[in-house]
Every structure is written in structure tokens, then in C-alpha cells.
Amino acid sequence: MGALAEKKQGDLAARLAAMDAPARGGAWLEAARAEARARLMAMGLPAARDEYWRFTRPASLNAPTPEPAAPFDDGGEAPMFGEVERLRIVFTDGVFDAAASDPLELAGVEIETLEEAGSRDIHWARDLYGVLETRGHSPVERPFAALNTAFAGAGVVIRVTGRAARPVNLIYRHESDTSDAILHHLVKLEPGADLTLLENGPGAARLSKVLEVDLGAGARFHHVRTQGRDPERTAVTHVFARLAEGATFKSFTLTVNGRLTRNESFVELAGAGAVAHLAGAALGDGAELPFHHDDTVFVTHSAPECESRQVFKKVLRNGAVGVFQGKILVREGAQKTDGYQKSQALMLDDDSTFLAKPELEIYADDVACSHGSTSGAIDEEALFYLRSRGVPERQAANLLVLAFLADAIDEIEDAAIADDIRTRLEGWVKRHRG
Amino acid sequence: MLKISNLHVKLQEEDKEILKGVDLEVPAGAVHAIMGPNGSGKSTMSYVLAGREGYEVTEGSATLDGQDLLSMEPEERAAAGLFLAFQYPVEIPGVGNMTFLRTAVNAQRKARGEEELSAADFLRLVREKAKTLKIDADMLKRPVNVGFSGGEKKRNEILQMAMLEPKMCILDETDSGLDVDAMKLVSDGVNALRDEGRSFLVITHYQRLLDHIKPDVVHIMAAGRIIRSGGPELALEVEHNGYADILTETA
Ligand SMILES: Nc1ncnc2c1ncn2[C@@H]1O[C@H](COP(=O)(O)OP(=O)(O)OP(=O)(O)O)[C@@H](O)[C@H]1O
Ligand SMILES: [Mg+2]
């Protein structure tokens, strides 16, 4: 064994030794876990020398125990998505909190906890759990996703057969300084089904989360998540999505604060005419604690006439680090692909870092793909223009920060939710800089 | 109202003096025009008055009603009543024109210790002023100046002026890029604001604007100095003969 492989295996062994197996599930879940564990054993944990981890040090995610992280006091702010008529499902430090949740009943939707679903033979869940995750390891391994599949003890499984009467809101509370949560969710949208999934909250001191979304023909999935503002928490999350013909997938993530966040998305446009939009807005200040945010996105066009769009924005200051690794892969035969990728960072000072690796890999000849990655400071001309109209410097700068994030937030389809996020951001940006 | 004395300005980055001792006084209620060849320093002077970075004042002073403009932040100058209609208005993607106007109006009110305008009052005011300048609802919704035509940008400057009701208005070539009808609209907008407590400094290359906005005094700036001042007839002289005679006279 080479030194690198030895390190990866050593880290994995140490991590596994510190882990508790989740409560035993039924046959299919245990089989899926065992299979994931075998894949994980073959991979080991990520190492700093892995190309895919060049910009983000995996050490704190690898460590047997999380770095302690105190829950954040938001000063009694109104709950996120509180204005939305929604079904709430609460996890506290990674544990399903039935008392705090609404009854799992929603017209057009079947919802169960992973524990429940895992104890019975639900064929669609069996056919999805770990399946999209497994597909997501080519061409790069994602050991934390395999680890998640092998060890997740909590989550929800959601099957949507029609139009969900209300959005489903997964709420992740963080109460313990040392919680190390592993959540795994499944969402299956039958042909023509429609669901909005909202997620908010940090979830734990250290959170590992996998969301597998399987979209049938013509299905629509809207996803909006905000990751909580706990400055000390770490998180590694994965979204694996597969889209059948004519399906639409739209995902937006807001990240404010966080010692380390790695959000991976792996989306496959498998049926003709499918549409996937992924957007993210991140705002970090490294003054008191490190801020490191990593968006790693892999979009595969496997079918013709699909559209994909990535819009990722980061506002960085005081030594904050932003990472974007984004790839559009267009397979042979995926003609008329429309692929777009934009990643931008607004640097509020000279101390911060933005590392970007945008990639296109194209094996079809009739496609339109573009990508652009930029980083820059506040536009001094615009700042002066605003100030010359009487807007104080800091307020003017805040306005420009929000303006910079605007086209990521514009990707949120629901206008009320987008407005809510804009308003909150305004407040946070103000306080953040005040 | 505005008093500029022996103002010398050089670029911060290079050793290049652009204003070489400007003397100018605009009394309350007056309209003064400045003409002058390209590159003579007209925009530089207006930027320096508004507080743009990149310049260094090496000598002289500029006051607004006795207050030292040059020691104030740009936003303080605005709150004190100074307004510059830019020769090249800036585009700000992502900031809606309405948001921009409301933020500016309320920031100035706040700075002066006045109450903020309610959303309804603000809306009523904007709509009314926009209408007279033929600025439609779509232009108000769009990001500041983004995708505006040259003339639309200039009208948008005048809308801001009308909303902010400054006491010292500097218009830097607001007429350039305007069609005949827009020129009339903009001039009407300016004339509607004329008041004994409000002064204007109108920078232009063309006599035509001054037919609409009648100046009390016309100044000629050349090579960073005011080299001649006179009545409206001075603008006519420039229109007919260009600057050659004036420049040789004073050389
Ligand atoms: N930032 C700068 N860097 C270099 N030169 C500058 C800068 N700003 C102004 N100048 C120079 O200063 C001189 C005055 O410019 P200014 O824009 O003030 O002229 P103006 O009178 O407004 O001209 P115009 O009628 O063409 O608008 C010009 O020669 C210009 O090139
Ligand atoms: Mg000029």
C-alpha cells in the first residue's frame, strides 16, 4: 500500500472505531448499508493530496470526533420559512423529533422516517437508497457520501405521486456542542409529480447529509435550503439527483457563516428535455472564526436537449475562503445541450481567497456550453455614485453586496420565499458589517 | 451658495495638475453655465466638488453656504444639498432604480434629521416626477441605468435631482445624447426646480441647452482655469466662433 492509501485507510479506521452503528433496520436497509460500507472500505477517507480535495482540507471532516461548535443565538429572529404554509419535519442534532414535527401527512405525498421505511420492504425506497449515491462516484470518489449511506440512522423518505399540497420543510436544529449528525433523505417524484422541499438550520456541530432525488418524467422539484448561521459548525452535504425526460430540478442554497461547509451536488440529466438549475449564495467573514465554503458541482448531460444552469456567488472578507469546483460533462449523443455555469466572488478586502475550478468536458458536437468564473472587489464607481446621492458608504456597500448576490437569489422560483431571503440577508449583511 | 477659490487639483496617481486655480462663485438662485474645450477640466471640477476619489487638492477651497465641501464625505456633501448629474451615469446591476431612489431620499432625510418618507408617499412622489420626465414604470423597476439608452440615463439623473431637491445642482453635459424632445423635457424639469434658494451650474458644449435654461452668467474654462466670464452672449460667441479667439485673447 502506498503512503497516500495508507493515510486514507488509517483515517477511515480511526473514524470507524469512533462510530456507533445505527439502529438495526430491515433486510434491504442493512444490505444497502453493508454494500456502502464495503465501497467505503475500498476508498478510504479523502486526503489533502486528493485532487478533488485540493482546495478544502478534509481533516476536520475525517476526524473521529467533531470540533465542538456552540449553537448560534439568532436573537429570536422569526423562523425561516415561517410565512410559508408548510409541513415541518424536525431533526434535533440529527435525531428525528416527532414531538416538534407536524404529523407526516400530506395530500399527494407519502412521507415516512428512514427508520420506519427501513424496517419494512418499501420497494421504491430500496431501489433508491444509496443507488444514486453509488452512481455519483464516477469519475470521482465521494467517500463521505458512502460513509453517510453506511451509517445514516435518520432521515425521511418522501414519495410524491401528484402535486404536493404544501412544501415539506426539513428543520435541522443544533443544540449540542458535540453532535455529529448523519442524515439521509430520499425523494422520489413519480411522473408529473411536483414538490417543494425546504431545508433550514445547521443540524449539528458536524453534519453529514445526503439527499437522493429521483425525478420521473415531467416531474418538478424545487429545493431551497439555508444552512444556519452557526459560525463554528462544519458540514459536508451531498445532493444526488437524476432527471427523467422533461423533468425540472431547481435548487438554491444560502450559506452564511460556518467554519467549514462542503456542498456537493451531482446531477444527471438522463431524459431528453430535462432542466436543472443549481444556485448558491454564500456570505462569509473570517474575522473571528475561519470561514471556508466549498461548492462542488457535477452536472452530467446524458440525454439530448437538456438545459443546465449553475449560478454560484460568494461574498468574502477577513480571510474567508470560497471554493468552487464545477463541471459540466456532456456525454456522446447529448446533442442540443444548453449548459451554463457561472461562479463569482466578491472580495471585500485583500485577505480573502477564492479558488475556482470550472470545467467543461464535451463529447457531443452540437451543444452550447459556457462557463465563467470571476472574482473582484466592490465596484468603486458604483459606490461613489451611490454615495454622491447621499447613501452612506457602508449602506452603499451593503446594497452592492446584495446586488451581487441578486442573480443567485433570483433562481428561487417562489417569489415570496425569495423576498423573505432577500430581506433576511439585508438584515444579516447590515449587522454583519456593523 | 457655491464658492470656489483658487482651486488646484492634481491626479493622485500621477503628477498631473488638471485644475490650475479655479475661481468661481454661484450665488443663491442663480444659473451659471460653464463651457470650454474638451479636456479643460470641467468634469474634474464637478467630481472634485462631489468628492470622488483619485484627486488631490493641492491648493484652494470650495464651500457650500460657507461649509467646507472638501473635508466632507461624498454622502455628507449630498446631504448638505450638493447634487451632480453625471456626464456618464453609472450602471448598477442588481440594484433596482426604485430601491436606489428610496434609499437615497431616505438617507438624506435621515442625515438631516427628518423623518423617512412612507412607502406610499414615496411612490406617489416618484410616479409624479417620473411622469413629467416621461420615465415609465419599467425604467423605474429596472436596475439603475442598466440597459438604459444614453438619453434615458440623462433623464434618470434629472429624476434623481427632482426627488432629492438639492440646493446646488451641477449638471455635467446633461444635454449630450438627448434628442430635441428630451432636451425640452429635461430643461422643463430643471426650470421647474428653479427657485431663489436653489442654484445651478450647467456644464455644456452647446448654446442650444442655454436657450431652454437661461443662464445668468456664462464661464469659459480652459486648461484648468476660468478664463472668461460674461452674460449669455458669451455662449453665442462660442457657438459662432469657437474658442480660438477667446483662447488667444487670454493667452
Ligand atoms: N483619472 C485620470 N487619469 C488621467 N487623466 C485624467 C484623469 N481624469 C482626468 N484626466 C485628464 O484631465 C483633463 C480634464 O478632463 P475632464 O474630464 O475634466 O475634461 P472636460 O473638460 O470635462 O472634458 P469634456 O468636455 O471632454 O467632457 C483631461 O486631459 C483628462 O484626460
Ligand atoms: Mg466632461
Image (tube, coloured by chain):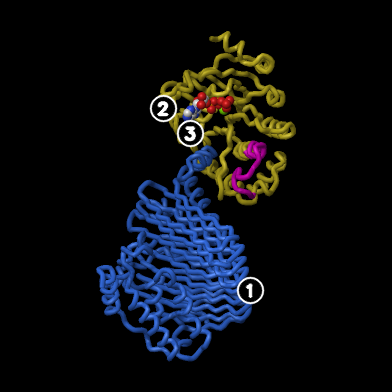
Chain colours: A blue, B yellow
Q: Position of residue A396 (x, y in %)?
A: 49, 45
A297 relative to A64 in the view: left or right: right
Instruction: Report whether mark 2 lies on the same chain as mark 3.
Output: yes
Q: Does the beta carbon at disc 2 come under 8 Å from ligand 1?
A: yes
Alpha-carbon span between mark 3 and mark 1: 54 Å
Quick one: B195 or A19, which is closer to the camera?
A: A19
Would you name the residue on which mark 3 appears? B52
Chain ID, mark 2: B
Which residue matches tag 2? B14
**Circle 3 chain:** B
Question: In x, y percent, where is residue B8?
Answer: 45, 21
Residue A401 visible? The answer is: yes
- Residue shown at 54% from the left, 75% from the top: A168
Tell me if mark 2 has few (under 14), some (14-19) or many (20+) residues whose alpha carbon lies within 10 angstroms of its own: few
Q: Which residues are magenta?
A: B141-156
Q: Which residue is mark 1?
A: A218
Dot 2 or dot 3: first in sequence order is 2
Please, what secondary structure does the residue beneath circle 3 have? Answer: loop
> Badge 1 sits on which subunit?
A
Q: Residue at x 48, y 72 (%)?
A: A240
Mark 1: which amino acid?
Answer: Gly
Q: Position of residue B69 (x, y in %)?
A: 48, 29
Q: Nearer the viewer, mark 3 or mark 1?
A: 1
